[in-house]
Image (tube, grey):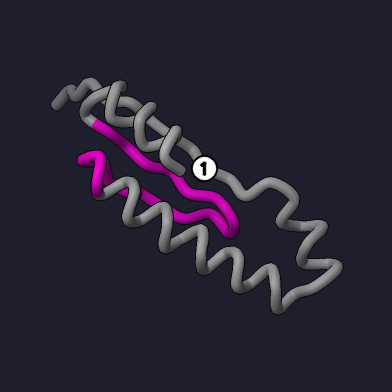
Amino acid sequence: MRQLAAIMFSDMFGFTALVQQNEQLATGKRIRFKDVLEASVSAFNGKILQYYGDGALSIFNSAIDGVNCAVEI
């Protein structure tokens, strides 16, 4: 089955350096990132396919929805 899709990969800037400086703060920020990502992707009719540490791969049926989600994040 073929499907047209817009793909978005999200990654936290500076996460590795933050972990080295303050692991507790980094963990809190990663949880916040996940919460914001889940709410935003859902609001723009997307789906999170997989998490990769401090990043995530999401899919949208509409490129416009994907871009609007990225802008909101």
Specify the farthest residue to the left.
Answer: 1
Disc 1: which residue: 10
Specify the farthest residue to the bottom.
Answer: 24
Tell me which segment is drawn in magenta: 43-60
The relative height of residue 45 versus residue 35 in the rendered view (above or below) is above
Going by the numbered disc 1, the residue's amino acid type is Ser
Specify the farthest residue to the front.
Answer: 72
Say which residue appears at 82% left-offset and 57% top-offset.
17
| Residue 7, horizontal then vertical, whole percent | 38, 30
The relative height of residue 66 versus residue 30 in the rendered view (above or below) is above
Q: Residues within 10 Å of mark 1 (few under 14, many from 20)?
A: some
Secondary structure, mark 1, is strand
In the visual, does 14 lie left or right of 33?
right
Q: Is residue 48 magenta?
A: yes
| Residue 3, horizontal then vertical, whole percent | 19, 24
Taking depth in this image into account, of 36 and 23 the one nearest to the observer is: 36
Figure quadrant of residue 71: top left
